[in-house]
Image (cartoon, rainbow, N blue to C red):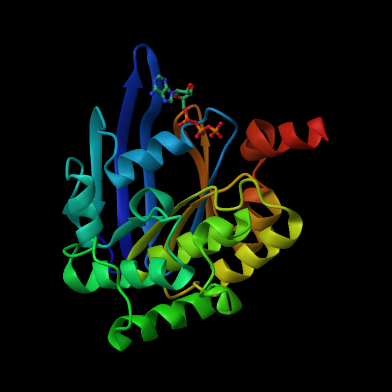
Amino acid sequence: MSADLLLAVDGLEKRFGALKATDGLDLEVRTGEIHALIGPNGAGKSTLMKQLSGEMKPDAGRILFRGADITYATAPRRARLGIARSYQITSIFPDYTVLENVATAVQMRMTGGAGILRRAKGDADIEEPALKLIERVGLSGAHDRLASALAHGQQRQLECAMALALEPSLLLLDEPMAGMGPQESAIMVELLRGLRGQVTTLLVEHDMDAVFSLADRITVLVYGKAIATGSPDEIRNNPAVREAYLGEEADAS
Ligand SMILES: Nc1ncnc2c1ncn2[C@@H]1O[C@H](COP(=O)(O)OP(=O)(O)OP(=O)(O)O)[C@@H](O)[C@H]1O
């Protein structure tokens, strides 16, 4: 396994009855990259993400993280190894402020998950990094607002701050722009762009403008198989991809 390989998926399979939602899938994610997963509806993107986070067990194949086999590791174990799935692992507490939410996530990392029910308040060791994260995701002015009072896009920014508080080695982001308007999407794109080279990110996203402007590499899934992996330009110009996916979109527009 080469040194810059963080995650390797090898011949992964997941069946639902007769349907193979993941069908002999191979995928490699390199350290530091933003790797996007795209594909038509039902291609198996969410099913793959669930198998990577540990919410769903594969039927066959292997998942290697830093060379170690985690195919059947539990979700908490993967979280401890540094795999964070944005809003599965870090759900927002609606009646906490932005700062309290992020401080709780910082505290969770510091204590390894213990003591998360105690509100993290007034502790500079926790609040300082929390405030830095809040600034990093673009929520500076909103630190004392209740999470429930935030706009949808701001709640997604908050989720990102909480996922980053865990200092993950691999961030799994499932449709971070879903339900966002153009302005909110642009903020999220900038936020994710700022993570390039710092946090390895596997991104499932339907917003093709965002994907093609952000991703270092893109893998295209069709019927549970990876039909191509490459740079945005390589994917844009790949005839099989155009036929299977992008061409379909172009026809529809
Ligand atoms: N729990 C389940 N039981 C049965 N079939 C399922 C289950 N989850 C997913 N599927 C099926 O597996 C296939 C892949 O679904 P999945 O949600 O992973 O696709 P996707 O690429 O994420 O789609 P979308 O872009 O619409 O979110 C689909 O045919 C779906 O109907």
Residue 212 in the image: above or below residue 50: below
Residue 217 left/right relative to 164: right
Residue 114 left/right relative to 5: left
Indicate the position of residue 135 as horizontal and vertical percent values. 53, 80
Residue 158 in the image: above or below residue 136: above
Residue 80 left/right relative to 9: left
Indicate the position of residue 248 as horizontal and vertical percent values. 72, 31
Identity of the residue drawn at 39% across and 53% down: 91
Indicate the position of residue 113 as horizontal and vertical percent values. 19, 62
Q: Nearer the viewer, residue 235 or 145?
A: 145
Identity of the residue drawn at 21% across and 61% down: 81
Indicate the position of residue 175 as horizontal and vertical percent values. 54, 47
Q: Is residue 215 visible?
A: no
Looking at the rendering, in which quadrant would you find the N terminus?
bottom left
Identity of the residue drawn at 25% across and 45% down: 63
Identity of the residue drawn at 31% across and 51% down: 8
Residue placed farthest to the right in the image?
Answer: 253
Q: Nearer the viewer, residue 241 or 250?
A: 250
Q: Nearer the viewer, residue 193 or 249?
A: 193
Count all numbered tags in the image, as a single digit.
0
Image quadrant assignment for residue 200:
bottom left
Q: Is residue 36 visible?
A: yes
Image quadrant assignment for residue 151:
bottom right
Looking at the rendering, in which quadrant would you find the C terminus?
top right
